[in-house]
Image: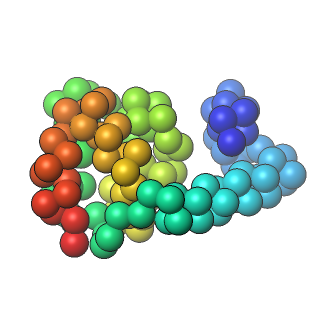
């Protein structure tokens, strides 16, 4: 996954990847999602209180989605999915939000819908 993201970043856009790389990316993304759901599930969707807190930290630190993704060790599309409520959080992401953006884990856990 990392090598595909690096390749897409170096090309300037993930859409410029070969069809083979795009397919691998989709398959790996689905496998990761299934693994996270099985081994690190958190109930509910991401509330707007949490996404607002993430956006506020991004703004305070002058971070764009790409930089936030790098900071959290996830893809830019995953950051977008979280910010738009299309993807729930897992335990690892909660820890990274706490450690890298300074959002208290208690706040996140208290506000999961």
Color scheme of the displayed model:
rainbow
**Residue 82 against residue 69 in the figure, above or below:** below
Write the residue at 13% across / 51% down: 107
Residue extending furthest front? 39
Write the residue at 72% across / 33% down: 3
**Residue 63 against residue 25 in the figure, above or below:** above
Is any part of residue 30 visible from this angle? yes
The picture quadrant where one finds residue 68 is: top left
Quadrant location of the C terminus in the rendered image: bottom left
How many numbered dots are placed on residues in this image? Answer: 0
Write the residue at 66% across / 35% down: 2
Q: Where is residue 61 in the image (x, y as percent from the top left)?
A: 22, 27
Is any part of residue 66 visible from this angle? no
The picture quadrant where one finds residue 110 is: bottom left
Q: Position of residue 55 (x, y in %)?
A: 23, 45
Q: Position of residue 91 (x, y in %)?
A: 37, 51
Quadrant location of the N terminus in the rendered image: top right
Q: Where is residue 39 in the image (x, y as percent from the top left)?
A: 50, 59
Q: In the visual, does 67 lie left or right of 8?
A: left
Write the residue at 64% across / 63% down: 30
């Amino acid at each position: 996954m990392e090598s595909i993201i690096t390749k897409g970043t170096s090309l300037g856009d993930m859409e410029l990847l070969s069809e083979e790389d795009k397919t691998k990316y989709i398959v790996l993304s689905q496998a990761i999602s299934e693994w996270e759901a099985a081994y690190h599930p958190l109930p509910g969707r991401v509330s707007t209180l949490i996404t607002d807190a993430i956006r506020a930290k991004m703004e305070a630190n002058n971070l764009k989605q790409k930089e936030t993704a790098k900071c959290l060790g996830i893809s830019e599309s995953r950051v977008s999915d979280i910010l738009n409520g299309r993807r729930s959080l897992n335990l690892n992401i909660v820890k990274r939000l706490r450690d890298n953006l300074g959002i208290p884990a208690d706040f996140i856990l208290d506000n999961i819908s």
